[in-house]
Image (tube, coloured by chain):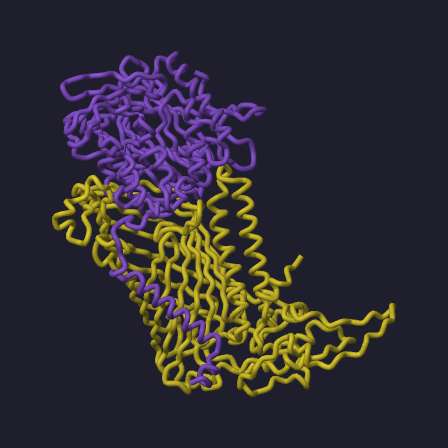
Chain colours: A yellow, B purple
Amino acid sequence: MINWCLVLLLGLAPPSSDAAGDAADEAPADAPLETPPAESAESPAPPESAPEPESAPEPAPDPVEIEAPEPPIKTPEPETEPEPETEPEPEPEPEPEPSEGAEATDAPEPPPPSLDPNNPPVLPPDAAGRRLHRCLPGVEPCLLTTQRRLYLATGGILVAGAATYLIYNASDRNKVGDPGVSLIGGGLVAVSSAVIGGAAALLGDDGPAIYDRLYTPTMSLSVGPGGSGTTDESVPYSLSGSLAPTLAFPRNLGRLRLVSSVGGDLGSSLDRDPRPQTALDPNGVGNGAGGNFDSALEIQGLDVELGLDLAMRLPPRRRRGQTRAEARALRGPDQFRSFELRYKPLFFIQRDQLNLAGGEQRVSQRVSLTPLNVGARWQVSPRQRFTFYLGPRWDMVGYGQPGAVQGGKPALGPLYSETWFDLDVPLLRPHLGGPADRKTWAVSQLTLGYIHSRLTSPGYNTGAVVGFFGHFVVQYAVRFRPRGSFVAYQVDVGARVGSALTPFLRLGVVLPDITPGARR
Amino acid sequence: MIQRLHRLRPRHALIGAASLLGLGALGLTTLEGCTEVECATPDYTRAECRVLAENEVARLRSSEGVEVRFQTDAAAEVQDHSSWAAEGVVRELGEIVEARGAHMGAYALSLRPDASSEAQEVQLRLTNVHPRALVRTLAPGGVELVAEGQGTTRSITAPVSPGQTTWVRVELDCSGYANGYRIAALGDVQTNPTQFARILERMQDEAVYAEQAGQLFVGAVMAGDLTETATEEEFIAFAEALEPASFPIALVPGNHDVYDGYQPHYNLAFGPGNYAFDVCDSHLAMLDTGSGSLAPSIIGRLPQLFAKGEQAHSLTVMHHPPYAELSAAGWSDEAMAMIMLGEFAHQDGDAVIAGHAHMLDEFDLNVAGRDIEEIIAGTAGAAQGAGHPLYGYVRLTFTGDTIERCFVEVPTPGAIPVQNTTSDMPICDEA
């Protein structure tokens, strides 16, 4: 049974939805539906901006292709047959949006229905039902994003629930824990995605693909703040640089991106030995850092990550009665493709220099590989994407004194998985002008993720659930592109949420994709 | 201004709030003025805070002004009473000072009245002592006494003198057993102390079977999750469940044993979670991974904890398996787990014994060029999921240079004993 409260929560379509489309979609031909005045007042979404000027960056062929700068979508036309009386109103001025309750109160009382038992009255479906069948304005063909979010939430709940059930019932002995926990993490992100996506739609931020939407910067520097909550201990700042050029495939088939980063601590972390019997003389100068516990451990780490991220777009699903030629004809900037196949082999190297108690020095070197990390991306809406990767992981653990590190043999480790939800958030109000009208164009993106790995960041623990989950990632990024510039600038602020909160700040530069055969 | 506020769209408010949260998070991590020394405000769910606790409970100043401290055997050898070691827990129960040794290896206690104390003697009760262990009291003036008692408890009235130190030493002599010795390993009781009681009863027979085989049953090591929710009542009940045991048990806490942030119930009941000891020709390092990782200071002390010296074998026992494979039941910080494994391999470690995953498993790892065996024995009673549960303990038999392992199943009433385990580990012969 569908939980309609969930539908209402997740499925709130954007207030600019086209009511005529809804009515034509769901109403029987012989039962014309009344267009609610409140919804007809919510005009279709205004265009994000004017048509792309010549000074704008070279547009990518597909507006929903996440990586490339894209021209704004033109004024939308509903996918379903528009009714004359419900043509989109061009005025973009925001108006107070009457609530469902207000609508019901203001409407005149309908006449009593006829009570012919052979011809029962056809009652209009409730509001939730209409939302489920409402096309996303400005996108063609019709996208039922409310349904998609509902599918995503239901899928997330089912997957997470089934995995939880399996873990508690099949339990550790049957070794279902690792895939189970990765699916629970993915399911939680899926449900959160649907809720956040629904909330964004409710706030009017769902619609056609936004111009120049965000993705990984081509070059970037990340800073992780240091500082310790313990007086005489220290956690250094960390700095890492990354390079992620993107090769766009011809005919908009997908892309290949390099995943690379090198970084480490800008100093050593210092931990103290809290044993009272080994504390330094409290009447002396102590340890010189505000306490009298002796030093126990110093670590300075270096991390290297190298990999590829391949995205292959699936062809659009042919609709019933649509010929192959018609489906092909739909290809172009307005075509929305829902699924991408992903392949993301990764290679991690972590090297820590350790200064242990008693002055012992060691080097710990871990190498991890995920050569079979595959996944898929689902475009929940042009502005909302859900991505999932899963693959086995092999580790090689090396250790030893400096200059004499012994390597280890590959061992099959826990599964590696990533789950991501990206939500594009337009920053600039479209009726004030498009990219050509502004000195700088700005877009933003909210990202929520779960990485089923406790290798690069400590995992998330709650209660007695310790050592099972990987870590979550929350990130908000803003991209700025000066008018006519091929280069954009990006600022990401986020945090990895595990047994500790690890915030980070990333400053990046975005260059155009490498496009073979593209004419300059 | 009000009009401008009205023009703000919800997304702007969201963006603003997200930005403020981000900046706040960045700022909070760097506010040096808001720091305090380790565990100044106790939070015993933190591993480092428990390190402090386990060392504090290893000493006591009695109501009569006698400083009672656990000491290493090495400190007793040179009669250095200036410090103490986390080798057990001391508490005062009326007129008796009770000291629970954490393990079956050698350790000592120093009793030293302060100069103003009028105490002439200390009624000392030692628990968790091997029945064959020799407990000697070396009082000032060269007086030597041997403690009396049965099972795992010894009582002694130790003479003390103000300003002087009386030493009590506990040692287990493994000589006389030509065929080696045995140690039992298991973990994860949680919600099934009833089954654990059956397993404990079966382990009582282990000493008899070992004797028949010309081997010494040294005792058991338990890899945590002794309770379900870490309440004081549960720890008391578990301690009472151990009362009938005729052998010592070395314990570490699991994640289910470290819930309470305000009271270190595990440490108060059983003493340390991080300690090392030698018994017969083996070195055992017990590690507290209840928080999903080791305390950083314990990482720093790993070379000392894993140093096996002249011992032939080296084992380490912890709750969370350092290498989880596909069980998902691993450390919260895998980097720290791999550092621990690296140091263990570097110090010629042989086997890691863990629990956390409610199953029996065994596999080899090659770390830093050395093969290490990892044994997961979460079979002490906790629910194992669908299918016939495999309860019991792993028997480790040390003979010369080899460590043989097999599983002693203790089936629930009504269940038919299994013929094979789900791992490569064989079922033990009855003897």
Residue A304 in the image: above or below residue A477: above
Residue A235: which quarter of the image? bottom left
Q: Quadrant of the N terminus of chain B?
A: bottom left
Answer with left or right where residue B243 lies relative to residue B179.
Answer: right
Q: Nearer the viewer, residue B265 or B68?
A: B68
Residue B142: which quarter of the image? top left
Q: Using the rendered image of the protein, determine whether residue B168 is visible from the camera's viewpoint.
A: yes
Residue B421 in the image: above or below residue A128: above
Q: Nearer the viewer, residue B221 or A415?
A: B221
Q: Residue furthest left?
A: A284
Answer with left or right where residue A53 lies relative to residue A238.
Answer: right
Which residue: 41% across, 52% down? A460
Q: Quadrant of the C terminus of chain B?
A: top left
Q: Using the rendered image of the protein, determine whether residue A263 is visible from the camera's viewpoint.
A: no
Residue A250: x percent and y percent?
Answer: 45, 70
Residue A386 in the image: above or below residue B269: below
Which residue: 28% across, 20% down? B156
Q: Nearer the viewer, residue A377 or A226?
A: A226
Residue B216: x percent and y percent?
Answer: 34, 17
Answer with left or right where residue B115 lies relative to residue B54.
Answer: left
Residue B406: x percent and y percent?
Answer: 42, 24
Residue B215: which quarter of the image? top left
Answer with left or right where residue A203 lies relative to residue B424.
Answer: right
Q: Report how many numbered discs are placed on residues in the image.
A: 0
Q: Nearer the viewer, residue A405 or A3?
A: A3
Residue A268: x percent and y percent?
Answer: 21, 54
